[in-house]
Amino acid sequence: MAIEVVLKRWGNSIGVVLPKELIDKEKLKENERVLIEVVKEANLSHIFGTLKTGMTGQEFKDMVRKGWKT
């Protein structure tokens, strides 16, 4: 089960809080050992490009559709 969490500083360490839904689903208990796989969120704009116009994707689609007279 993949869940997005936010890292928080605890003293000199960094930790995560697991959502109750995950704890219930996996039947996790206090002091139980678990294996966590870390996958950082990626910025893919260099692969797919970005709109340099400053408009949202929806605004861009609306502008393009105005030219599609049927």
Image (spheres, rainbow, N blue to C red):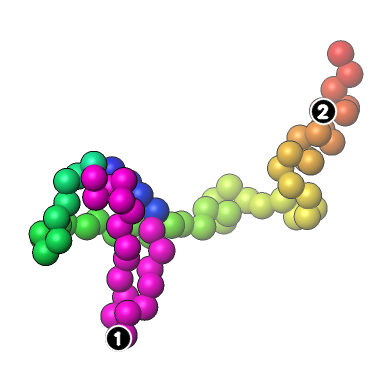
Residue name at image x 31 percent, y 51 percent: 20
Residue name at image x 86 percent, y 13 percent: 70
**Residue 11 position in % (x across, y down):** 31, 85
User: Image check: 62 left or right of 8?
Assistant: right
**Residue 34 position in % (x across, y down):** 14, 57
The kind of secondary structure element at disc 2 is helix
Nearer the observer, 66 or 34: 34
Q: Quadrant of residue 5?
A: bottom left
| Crowding near the residue tagged with mark 2, few <14, some 14–19, many ≥20 C-alpha atoms within 10 Å | few
Q: CA distance from mark 1 to mark 2?
A: 53 Å
The kind of secondary structure element at disc 1 is loop
Eyeballing the image, is 54 above or below 67?
A: below
Eyeballing the image, is 7 above or below 18?
A: below
Indicate which disc, 1 or 2, sits on the residue closer to the N terminus.
1
Q: Tell me which segment is drawn in magenta.
A: 5-24
User: Image check: 40 left or right of 58?
Assistant: left
- Identity of the amino acid at label 2? Arg
Circle nearer the viewer, 1 or 2: 1
Nearer the observer, 46 or 30: 30
User: Image check: 58 left or right of 43?
Assistant: right
Q: Residue furthest top?
A: 70
Residue at the spot of label 2: 65
**Residue 54 position in % (x across, y down):** 78, 55
Nearer the observer, 69 or 7: 7
Total labels: the figure holds 2
Q: Residue furthest left?
A: 32
Eyeballing the image, is 38 above or below 49?
A: below
| Crowding near the residue tagged with mark 1, few <14, some 14–19, many ≥20 C-alpha atoms within 10 Å | few
Q: Which mark is residue 12?
A: 1
- Identity of the amino acid at label 1? Asn
Q: Which quadrant of the rendered structure holds the N terminus? A: top left
Nearer the observer, 10 or 46: 10
